[in-house]
Image (cartoon, rainbow, N blue to C red):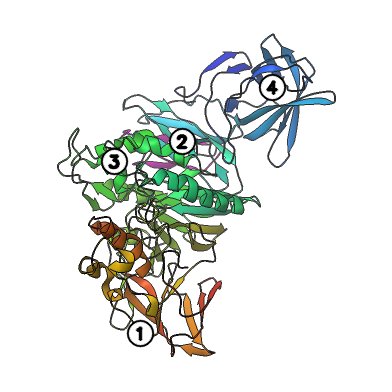
Amino acid sequence: MDQTRRKFIKAGSLTTLYGLSGLGFGFVSCKKDNVIDENNVLNISGVSIPSTLDVTAGQEVTLTGKGFKIGDQIEMKTADNSAFTSTVISVTDTTVTFLLPDGISTGNYNLTVIRGAKSLFLGGVLINLIANVDLPDKAGMTVKGLVYCNGVGVAGVVVSDGYEVTTTDDKGRYYLPSQKKTGFVFISVPGNYEVVTDGNAPQFFKRLSNAVNTVEQKDFSLIEANNEKHVVVTMADWHLANRNNDLDQFTNKVLPDVNATINKYAADGTKVYVLTLGDLTWDLYWYNNNFGLQEYLPYMNKLACPVFNLIGNHDNDPYVANNDWEAEAKYRDIIGPTYYSFNLGKVHYVVLDDVEYLNSGGSEGVIGSRNYNEKIVSEQMEWLQKDLATITDKSTPIVIATHTPLYKNPTLDVNGNQVDTLDLSNGGSLINSLKEFSTVHVLTGHTHINYSVEEESNVMEHNTAAICATWWWTGKNGYAGNHICKDGSPGGYGIWKMDGQNIEWLYKGIGHGEDYQFRAYDLNEVHITAAEFAPKSSDSLLEPYAGPYAQKSSGNEVLINVWGYDSEWKIEVSENGNKLGVDRVYALDPLHIISYDALRLNAGATPTGAFTTTETAHLFKAVASAPDSTLEIKVTDRFGNTYTESMVRPKAFSYDIR
């Protein structure tokens, strides 16, 4: 048991708990003091319930509280209304004691005291049935422990220190010959189980001392949870930094949207989890704005489900140069391991750190250049091989999550075929390590654009655009009032729907319904001039950013941006019942040009190179026969879902075009 987090006073079978921490999945609990008996029905006061009760089966439990009576009933009810009842067996002036009921299991419970026909709600608690076992030492093994659920060991759970990997035996016991290099021991949470959370962060890891010769016992408690069917919300590139009124945009636009999605899918009991894809913060502003990883946590904790985190290049310490490990130290201290795995239902997830932070010129008090290599370092690749070796069923879907992409933003050849180029420097090694698995999805962020790559028969990359869109610029007060990424995608997030081994996904724009999957432009109406979109600037400054849209068009072309596009999508356009030819093009999205590039010029600034409009291959063109005909646009995704627009032309071009 981790004595750094819990304090116990034991007397025989009686355990009194003080100030315990830990939150159950899907359940927000806290220490509840001074329960108010508003109608004075029971005259009970001063009740204090800890967040977590770590107890053994059949144990007597003592809570703080006044006014209880022997014979009172303590009802413990779950969210699905399963209830257990125990009788108060002892009271003092300041405490109440009852026996843990037979058959109760680890989980979240609401406690109510009942006396005859009267009752009073006391609060919520995570009851955690522990297995209090001291394991014998083994020669050469420096970390040992028990993985259990409801006080019983669980076999076959994968345990690692980031270098060594083992599995629990038939009694849930594990031993590791750890050198304690990462400072952690962690489990790969098995499918249909969960662990307690600290805020929203799953506590699948324990911290180790640096004393290699000291044997440490670290136990893990699992909670039964049917997540065979589950949803994962992928949120890339938060870039919270307390600038561009980002905290306001996150709180009032992003958060309500994401929580509505979480609640929608959770309404029928489906388990929902968030998986971040890196750049939670912005290293440049850690010290200048006093906003770093510690300040990120309260915003993460506002989400309505557990959150698995991933480190991005901007989550490294900008005062540390030429030492990737030390640059990650604050992330490890505040968030946890930088690489790990877990299972939800029948899907195996692996979170990897593919940024080797260099930060040339950095030193204490001096922010360096914040440069980095896009690679998975050798120690991590070796760990990955060991982790994947524990998955004996190679039909198991594998989801790899990294920050920087495996492939670059695709281009098109002269025939309109997609051209894919590896971006990760050792991407070939990563692909090779996955060759035995039939279904692999690689989820990435970093680019603030959407694209998919299916270069390998068993591996598909999904580069996910950013929840901050263009670093919060287009939604900043006084700017375009929209939320647009560099490729014209709305700022948003991925929704992954898992049911057994069946997987479906989509990209959802913030502020839009799930059925908003494309935007169509009448290019006759798209003319980007300084007079209209940057009146304080000039056409000569704007034209390099406006590209082809700097000139008036009369070609009756329509441009369709399909941000979730992959090879199995179909785009159809018809005019007066006649199908038009549709060509895939590699081009700029005009809405982003006026929403960011033009408005930065209008403010007297030079658009930041990394933020300017990016050419994308998920654009399509069709040519109509007339400038004022109505076009029927139908987009069908790989799962057979259709999205349509009856495009009445002329169609105005503006910041709020849909």
Q: Position of residue 592 (x, y in %)?
A: 35, 64
Q: Residues within 10 Å of mark 3 (few under 14, many from 20)?
A: some
Q: Which of the labelled discs sits on residue 36, or is there none?
A: 4
Taking the image as shown, residue 114 lies to the left or right of residue 170, namely right
**Mark 3–mark 1 distance (CA, rounded to whole Å):** 46 Å
**Earlier along the polypeptide chain: callout 2 or callout 4?**
4
Above-or-below relation of 596 to 320: below
**Earlier along the polypeptide chain: callout 3 or callout 2?**
2
Q: Position of residue 586 (x, y in %)?
A: 32, 75
| Helix, strand or loop under label 1 | loop
Q: Is residue 475 magenta?
A: no
Magenta-drawn segment? 153-181
Taking the image as shown, residue 270 lies to the left or right of residue 589, namely right
Q: Which residue is mark 1?
A: 554
The residue at the far left in this view is: 361
**Can you see residue 138?**
yes
The answer to which of 64 and 298 lies nearer the viewer is 298
- Amino acid, disc 1: Ser
